[in-house]
């Protein structure tokens, strides 16, 4: 699914990714851990094509995230730790997501309801004016409704209350076995029942990669 080969990314003469080698296979459910500054988010952003590597390569199902970014983003759903300050109303946002990804608006609304979020009352409201929890629930609903091959979550439950976290993890447990998931998380105890692999990064390197 994803191959990272000898990847190097530098910021201010520091190797934030320091010759990283990693293969994520179909059906892998991964917890990606490590201290702040370990390179976790930089690795994910490089997989998504946000960053150009200084050397090495990344392929997502054979596609280069920079040269073939549209193809790569078709295959991945990403939920950031901090929701972006989107000024579109929910109606406009759903229409944009639907047209750009082919995801049905009704599917997004249905996934939102499964997260106990009824967006019908807030369709005229700008996304950035929603509460932190509502924003995160809607981003989760969009990601799940897209039916991607790969789901990447950067601390996805940071803005969720305990009940919403439980709902979220229950929905993930229902995903098809062939879907690959990657969690950047500091809460390993929350995802232990959902993962089959733990990867630990430090100082830009993969220092531990354990299959469970």
Image (spheres, helix red, strand yellow):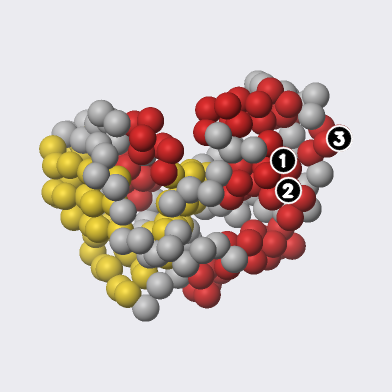
Name the residue at 56% across, 40% down. Answer: 82
* Badge 3: residue crowd in 10 Å (few <14, some 14–19, many ≥20): few
Which residue corresponds to the image point at 82% horizontal and 32% vertical from the top-left? 122
Q: Which quarter of the image is occupied by the N terminus?
A: bottom left
Task: State the image coordinates of residue 91 (x, y, percent, origin top left).
Answer: 73, 26
Q: Which residue is mark 1?
A: 106
- Determine whether label 2 and label 1 are within 8 Å by CB: yes
Whether residue 81 is visible to the viewer of this picture, yes or no, is no
Residue most extreme to the bottom: 212
Residue 67 visible? The answer is: yes
Q: Position of residue 63 (x, y in %)?
A: 26, 39
Label 2 element class: helix
Q: Nearer the viewer, residue 12 or 190?
A: 190
Q: Which residue is mark 3?
A: 121
Q: Nearer the viewer, residue 179 or 80?
A: 179
| Residue 189 place in picture, x, y as percent | 53, 72
Residue behind mark 2: 110
Disc on the earlier residue, 2 or 3: 2
Density class for disc 1 (Cα within 10 Å; few <14, some 14-19, many ≥20) is: few
The residues tagged by marks 1 and 3 sit, at their Cα atoms, a distance apart of: 15 Å
The quadrant where residue 7 appears: top left
C-alpha span from label 2 to label 3: 14 Å
68 in relation to 30, above or below: above
Tell whether label 3 touches label 2 (CB within 8 Å). Answer: no
**SS label for mark 3:** helix
Establish if 155 lies above or below 100. Answer: below
Q: Quadrant of residue 104?
A: top right
Rendered location of residue 125, percent (x, y) = 78, 26
User: Which badge, 1 or 3, comes first in the chain's sequence?
Assistant: 1
Q: Residue at x 23, y 57 (%)?
A: 22
Count the marks: 3
Q: Residues within 10 Å of mark 2 (few under 14, many from 20)?
A: some
């Amino acid at each position: 699914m994803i191959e990272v080969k000898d990847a190097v990314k530098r910021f201010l003469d520091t190797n934030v990714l320091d010759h990283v080698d990693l293969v994520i296979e179909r059906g892998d459910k991964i917890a990606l851990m490590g201290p702040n500054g370990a390179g976790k988010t930089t690795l994910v952003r490089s997989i998504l094509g946000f960053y150009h590597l200084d050397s090495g390569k990344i392929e997502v199902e054979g596609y280069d995230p920079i040269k073939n970014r549209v193809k790569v983003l078709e295959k991945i759903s990403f939920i950031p730790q901090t929701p972006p300050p989107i000024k579109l109303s929910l109606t406009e946002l759903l229409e944009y997501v639907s047209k750009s990804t082919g995801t049905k608006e009704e599917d997004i609304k249905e996934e939102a309801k499964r997260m106990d979020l009824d967006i019908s009352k807030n369709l005229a409201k700008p996304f950035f004016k929603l509460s932190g929890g509502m924003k995160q629930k809607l981003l989760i609903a969009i990601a799940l409704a897209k039916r991607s091959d790969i789901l990447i979550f950067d601390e996805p439950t940071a803005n969720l209350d305990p009940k919403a976290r439980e709902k979220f993890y229950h929905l993930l447990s229902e995903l098809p076995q062939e879907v690959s998931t990657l969690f950047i998380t500091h809460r390993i105890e929350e995802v232990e029942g959902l993962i089959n692999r733990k990867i630990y990064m430090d100082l830009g390197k993969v220092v531990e990669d354990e299959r469970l």
